[in-house]
């Protein structure tokens, strides 16, 4: 199999409104925009598409067209979580998970996007050596 790109599709009650959220706060740009479908790309990841498809639209197929988006987390890997969180808080976003440093080597924060998607800002940091020793693992 040969791939040319990867698309992640999120079912949305309001694809255009959701697209505006991702464009305004996270730097995505639309590559296609209809009232029932919007395809977004980020300049840092040209081969990855975040597509927003209206819930119930036939394009979702027979199974997904009857569903809503739940349990989806979109992790955006960033170089400085704290800086991005400050910028987004100044823009009026409320974080459901404040900046948290995890012992396994992640600094992260989470905000709720439209349509039930959790957007996680994620920065890789050094794992806690004590935690690693308890896991019988070594840093890579």
Image (cartoon, rainbow, N blue to C red):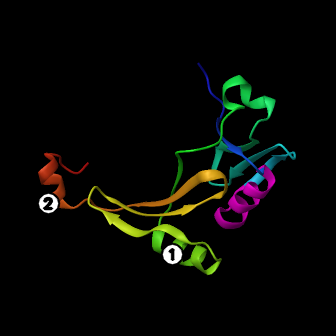
Membership of 27 in magenta stretch: yes
Q: Name the residue under label 1.
A: 83
Which sits earlier in the primary sequence, circle 2 or circle 1? 1
Q: Name the residue under label 2.
A: 130
Give how far apart the Cα atoms at labels 2 and 1 are.
Answer: 27 Å
* Relative horizontal placement of residue 130, taking residue 6 as reference (left or right): left
| Magenta segment, prevailing SS (helix, strand or loop) | helix
Estimate the x, y position of residue 134 in percent, counting from the top left: 12, 52
Q: Quadrant of residue 44?
A: bottom right
Residue contact at pointers 2 and 1, CB within 8 angstroms = no
Estimate the x, y position of residue 68 in percent, counting from the top left: 65, 41
Farthest residue in the right direction? 34
- State whether residue 80 appears in this view: no
- State whether residue 8 appears in this view: yes
Local secondary structure at mark 1: helix
Residue depicted at x 74% and y 40%: 55
* Relative horizontal placement of residue 20, taking residue 111 as reference (left or right): right
Q: Which of 34 and 43 is in front in this view?
A: 34
* Magenta range: 15-28
Q: Nearer the viewer, residue 94 or 44?
A: 94
Residue depicted at x 67% and y 31%: 64
């Amino acid at each position: 199999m040969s791939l040319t790109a990867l698309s992640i599709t999120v079912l949305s009650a309001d694809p255009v409104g959701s697209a505006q959220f991702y464009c305004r706060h996270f730097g995505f740009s639309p590559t296609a925009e209809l009232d029932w479908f919007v395809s977004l790309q980020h300049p840092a990841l040209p081969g990855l598409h975040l597509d927003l498809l209206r819930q119930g639209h036939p394009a979702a197929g027979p199974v997904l067209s009857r569903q809503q988006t739940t349990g989806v987390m979109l992790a955006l890997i960033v170089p400085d979580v704290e800086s991005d969180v400050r910028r987004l808080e100044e823009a009026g976003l409320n974080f459901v998970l404040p900046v948290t440093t995890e012992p396994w080597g992640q600094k992260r924060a989470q905000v709720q996007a439209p349509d039930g998607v959790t957007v996680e800002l994620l920065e890789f940091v050094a794992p806690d050596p004590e935690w690693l020793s308890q896991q019988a693992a070594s840093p890579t």
